[in-house]
Image: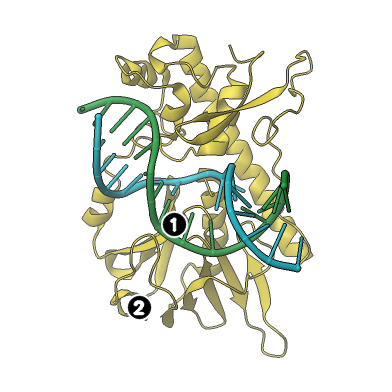
Chain colours: A yellow, B green, C cyan
Amino acid sequence: MPELPEVEIVRQSLLKNIKGKKINKVLVKNRNLRFKLETSFEKKLKSKFISNIKRFSKYLIIELENKNFCVVHLGMSGTIHIIKYKKDNLPTNTSFYSSPNLPKKHNHVEFFFKNMKLIYNDPRRFGYFQFFNNFNGLKKKFKNFGPEPFNKKFNSKYLINYFKKKDKNIKNFLLDQNFVSGIGNIYASEILYLSKINPSLSAKYLKKNQCKNIVINSRKILHNAIRKGGSTIRDFKNTKGKQGNFQKEFKVYGRYKQNCKRPSCMGTINKITQSNRSTFLCEICQK
DNA sequence: AAGAGGCCCTGATAGC
DNA sequence: TGCTATCAGGGCCTCT
């Protein structure tokens, strides 16, 4: 579900809410996430202060005191919710990603703080938590990951070099986390649409200019998504409880059989399958 | 060794 | 109404 921008938005929200707070207690209701949660997990986090919340790619990194780290991956359906307690009132509910109200089912992990609790909900359980007691462990986890699109290393030279002698379509490269980190199935389609590149094109045939466009448009799209997500999150908090999901407006993703959004184009959006995942494109614009 | 596909899991929706 | 099939935004693992 969540790609880099969505995880970044969760990070920003967590930063405001739980940075500097002490985890009084951890309650695991279901250990069977993507990777089984170790039985010592609760003990390792209990009584720890949260010093910072960072992010790499689609992963949240909760920094704890003494160089301890808790990595959270939301998988496809993971959401994080904060319940704030008010002394004289009912708890108020703040949800950080995609669901306006706290779901009743699949609340697998809870962190308790003084005046609030954090809840990890994940129906499909593709997400997971991972604890590291030093920085090296964390570094090792991400050592094979490609640069994020925002990274200077992600430039046209890098792309051209990487694509040499590789026979894989460009869409699958954008999903390949070893090549670039943080892009998922939605933004891959969006980036290629904006770049006017056909997703099925074997990457080795990309011209320098096309590589440049991919770099520029990856950054543009992810930045925009973060900006928009940020503002809807604020709206959502203000409207509490009201249906205030992310208003995601995609140019191609999910727009099968609808008109191409380019004013000059008479094309219709098509949906194809690449490595068992759907790709949306305009075959007129994306040659 | 690169690349394709299966699979982990639940829920929503479509079609009969 | 209830069944079955299909699909979903991730990524690890296996096989060729």
**What residue is shown with label 1?**
A126
**Residue A251 on image: x %, y %:** 69, 30
Identify the residue at horizontal 41%, vertical 22% (top origin). Answer: A155
Alpha carbon separation for disc pair 1 and 2: 20 Å
Q: Is residue A211 visible?
A: yes
Snapshot quadrant of residue A283: top right
**Residue A146 on image: x %, y %:** 35, 35
Identify the residue at horizontal 40%, vertical 64% (top origin). Answer: A33
Q: Dot 2 lies on which element?
A: helix
Identify the residue at horizontal 28%, vertical 50% (top origin). Answer: A141
**What residue is shown with label 2?**
A42
In the visual, does A138 lie left or right of B7? left
Q: Dot 1 lies on which element?
A: loop
Viewer-side residue, A68 vs A266? A266
Viewer-side residue, A214 vs A188? A188
Q: Are marks 1 and 2 on the same chain?
A: yes
Does residue A135 sit above or below A259 in this rendering? below
Does residue C6 sit above or below A270 in this rendering? below
> How many residues crowd around disc 2 within 10 Å: few (fewer than 14), some, or many (20 or more)?
some
Amino acid carrying label 1: it is: Phe
**Residue A83 on image: x %, y %:** 61, 75
